[in-house]
Image (cartoon, grey):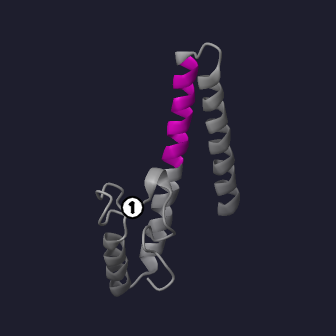
Amino acid sequence: TRERDDAGLREALAAYRKAMEEAWNAQTPDKAEIMARWEEGAELRRQLHEKMVDMRLAVLSVLTPEQREKLRTLAAEEPGCGGKGHGGEHHGMGHHGKGHGPGGCGGGSDA
């Protein structure tokens, strides 16, 4: 199920963070080890981003044009969601992939 897949990805990310911390905290940090861990993290982040894209597309597929417009309006007003106060670089996802729900930013139940 999706929940099991998501839990597995969360566990893998937690293990990655721990391994990276251990690599950096070694008596003599090894560049090859750190770079190998970084590559693992990059792949995990890619998988996470793909899941977020899939989820957002699934939400958008069931919204009416009016609901989509409301979602865009809310996202444009919300800091950290590409709106005022955060530079707009996240395009609907929060800092470091921590989105604001299935519709991206502003994706509350009345969207």
Camera-nearest residue between 42 and 14: 14
Q: Nearer the viewer, residue 28 or 42?
A: 28
SS at badge 1: loop
Q: Residue at x 51, y 24 (%)?
A: 35
Picture residue at 35% right of the left edge, 82% below the top: 70
45 versus 18 height, above or below = below
What span is colored magenta in the figure?
32-47
- What type is the residue that disc 1 sits on? Gly
Q: Quadrant of the C terminus?
A: bottom left
Sort mark 1 into few (<14), some (14-19) or many (20+) by Cα contacts within 10 Å.
Answer: many
Q: Which residue is mark 1?
A: 80
Which percent across, then down, holds residue 106?
43, 74
User: Can you say whether 21 is above or below 107 in the image?
Assistant: above
Q: Residue at x 31, y 66 (%)?
A: 83
Q: Quadrant of residue 15?
A: top right
Q: Is residue 17 magenta?
A: no
Left/right of residue 8 with respect to residue 66 in the rendered view: right
Q: Residue at x 53, y 48 (%)?
A: 47
Per the picture, the main secondary structure of the magenta-coloured stretch is helix
* Figure quadrant of residue 12: top right
